[in-house]
Amino acid sequence: MTALFAGLTTLDVLHRLDHVPDPSLKVTSTDFTMAAGGPATNAAVTYAALCAASRVSSGPIDEAGAASGAPLPSVDEPTLLTALGEGPVSAFLAADLAAVGVRVLDATTPAVRPAPEGGERASDAVQQAPASSRALREPAVSSIIEHPSGRMVASTNARLDADAGRIAADLPERVGAVLIDGHNPSLAHAALTLGVPKVDGEDPFAQLEARPPHPRILDGGSWKDWLTPLLGFVDIAVVSEDFAPPLMAHPDGAQVAEFLRGFGITRTVRTRGERSVQYWWDGASGEVPVEAVPDASTLGAGDAFHGAFTWAIERGGDADPERLIRFASAVAAVSVSSFGTRQWLTCPALAELVRSW
């Protein structure tokens, strides 16, 4: 079985400094990396890494495959429903995700190109398109500088239009779990309604009550207004401390859980950085401590939690929320042990966690 992830893909360009930078001076970084990023994307990468670690733990690896470093083909390869756009940055993102074992369904809405005139070639017409138009076809880019006192981020907003209908025929027929992030309602709706039985008539409540055989998870980093009509399709909400529903400036966890319960979501998990993870689960509630670990880079740690949570619930069921949270927290702790969002994917500690699961 596999999982479907839907949401944002960005290019993350990450620099590390060994000192707090002076904004008026040019500085030299001590380390650098770039990779595909974004909440759902990082979660899918984490899921793929856990699948790879599981395959290694369960049997021998073909020597040729291990020597090449190429990802082994697998039926549990996660699918990422996203918009990559066009151009060299998009090509890099596609190659990066393929290298870590994530199958991409690119739902970018095709650009409207000016029709060639006379003997003009189509390629010439594209080249003559305004630069501003071409820029809108490129994915978002985040430039991140990590230093001893924190992090500085400059990024472009998600700006690609996506049409989930373009790739509907390519969606997997069956999945073990679905996760959406807080970006792109079209892709989120397509993912959340995958596998939902068809309901006769036009009763909207009957459509909401129809459930697929797999859990549907919301990665709620922050509130987005377009989430409201989709919450009825969500089974589990994994939210951050910054997730503040309408008219709630600084809600506590119980208030957020109660708000989500009004949409039929009876399972809410709330992460709080280095503090304990809270949960409200089918009438029960509690907290799970988070082990303090020295971190090299916290970029994507929350996304790693979501990807690991999805992997664990797809394989272990949803009867024990504390076990799910402990596993996801442990994977997130591994993710901060090295610089960037790729080095940790082959860390031996990840295989140990999979074996213990």
Image (cartoon, rainbow, N blue to C red):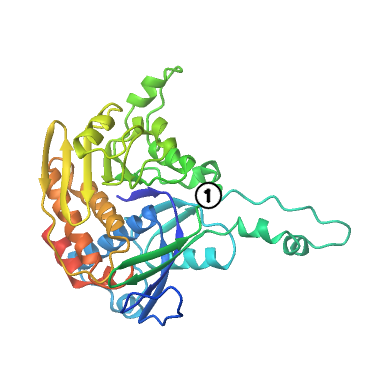
Please provide percent x and percent y for residue 256: 25, 35
Residue 167: percent from left, percent from top: 52, 46
Residue 109 image position (x, y, % from top left): 59, 48
Residue type highlighted by circle 1: Ala
Q: What residue would you read off at disc 1?
A: 107
Task: From the viewer's side, name the closer residue of 325 and 143.
Answer: 143
Can residue 77 be spotted in the picture? no
Nearest the viewer among 261 and 74 is 261
Considering depth in this image, is 58 or 252 the residue closer to the camera? 252
Relative to 316, does residue 133 appear above or below in the rendering? below
Residue 279 lies in quadrant: top left
Can the viewer see residue 125? yes
Going by the image, does 254 lie left or right of 38? left
Q: Is residue 178 above or below residue 124?
A: above
Residues 10 and 132: in front is 132
> Quadrant of residue 149 in the image?
bottom left
Quadrant of the image containing the C terminus = bottom left
Whether residue 87 sits left or right of residue 207 in the image: it is right
For the point 45% across and 39% down, which residue is it?
190
Residue at 34% in and 32% down: 247
Query: With 112 as the anchor, is 37 left or right in this view?
Result: left
Q: Residue furthest right?
A: 118
Q: Residues within 10 Å of mark 1 (few under 14, many from 20)?
A: many
Q: Position of residue 341 (x, y in %)?
A: 33, 67
Up-down relation of residue 328 to residue 101 (above or below): above
Identify which residue is drawn at 38% across, 38% down. 192
The answer to which image quadrant residue 293 occupies is bottom left
For the point 28% across and 74% down, the residue is 62
